[in-house]
Image: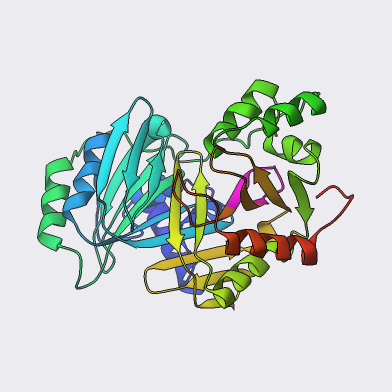
Amino acid sequence: MPKLAERFEDLRRDEPRLRARDAARRLGATEAALVASGATSAAATPLRPDWPALVAAFRALDPVMALTRNEHAVHERQGRFEDVSSGPGHILVLGPDIDLRLFPGRWTHAFALAGERPSIQIFDRDGEAAHKVFALAGRTDMAAWEALVGGFAAPGLAAPPDAPPASAAPAREGEVDAAALRTDWLALRDTHDFVRLLRTHRATRRQALALAGEDLAMPLDHACAGRATLELAAAGGVPVMVFVGNRSAIQIHTGPVHRLAPSAGGWFNVLDPTFNLHLREAGVAAAWRVVKPTEDGAVTSIELLDAAGGVVAQLFGARKPGQPELAAWRALAATVAERHALRGQAA
């Protein structure tokens, strides 16, 4: 695919900081096709799509930077892949550093990229990045990295799609029985049951939040709720959980946040030594303070949605199953709601 690589080089001459995802879109290509062309690195080696084994093999690299993103948020976490397990339709990575929920049913292609920033990048069937792992200069075990690449190298695999698929139509929102939805919401025993609640009532997340009542879902000022939450957490030393995901991966940071900074292009950032978050604030179309009952008591989150109703990011207080919510986090979320609520309005 030399033509694509040449067009990429022309684009990068004018915009050297342009990311591969954005460059691919500008070129009318998929990011997977751009990576496969060799345009973004010294070499791109296709890897065998044995997803549980590949993710488990990351444990030998120690440490790395794991990256999961969607259109409006990028989540970067340094550390070790520790407890890796898999089951029907999922791969779990648990540990104090790297914490992932992976759903490889859509994964199709993976490449090992050489060069100044060696990485392993996994793409779904539409050519969109699902998850990436980067070597850390002077820290990652590069002998183990090369052994992994050699063991999974699979030249001759089918090429990824050149062009992205046509944009899918927004999900249709049918009628929802608000009273029944609220009753079942109040009966939740675990935050993970919320997705099942949406399926049971055939409701989108946006619909459910709008119908539940402000005690369960309070609309917030989307222009500042995410930033305000992170600023209060940093100022008060309140440890948080930051979730960012896409259709086939969710990545979680648990711990404090410290260094916050806006940057060019409307991004608001957490720039800590082992955790970076990049949030495109213009992409946040709605924000909510959400309360979900559990066996451990109420659990509160600040949820940021895009214009289509998809989740950009979710912020919780740091906790583990079996533990009640941190009082400091609950107070923080109440402060955000008090200062930034859109009472009586649709978010």
Residue 138, located in which quarter of the rendered image? bottom left
The answer to whether residue 77 is left or right of residue 56 is right
User: Looking at the image, is 278 positioned above or below residue 25?
Assistant: below
Which residue is located at x 56 percent, y 32 percent?
193
Return the residue nearer the eye: 241 or 60.
Answer: 241
**Which residue corresponds to the image point at 59% horizontal and 44% vertical from the top-left?**
297
Residue 91 left/right relative to 53: right
Residue 34 percent location from the top left of the image: 40, 51
Q: Is residue 43 magenta?
A: no
Residue 198, quarter of the rendered image:
top right
Way the structure is coloured = rainbow
Q: Position of residue 134 (x, y in %)?
A: 30, 60
Segment tinted magenta in the rendering: 304-313
Against 197, residue 64 (above or below) is below
Give the residue displayed 79% in from the left and 63% down from the top. Answer: 338
Q: Is residue 253 visible?
A: yes
Asked whether residue 51 appears in the rendered view, the answer is no
Could you say where residue 145 lies in the image, as x and y percent from the top left? 16, 56
Name which quarter of the figure residue 208 lies in.
Answer: top right
Q: How many marks?
A: 0
Residue 178 to residue 273: above or below: above
On screen, residue 91 versus residue 235, left or right, reads left
Is residue 182 toward the left or the right of residue 111 in the image? right
At horizontal 22% and vertical 49% (from top left) the residue drawn is 58
Looking at the image, residue 334 lies above or below residue 161: below
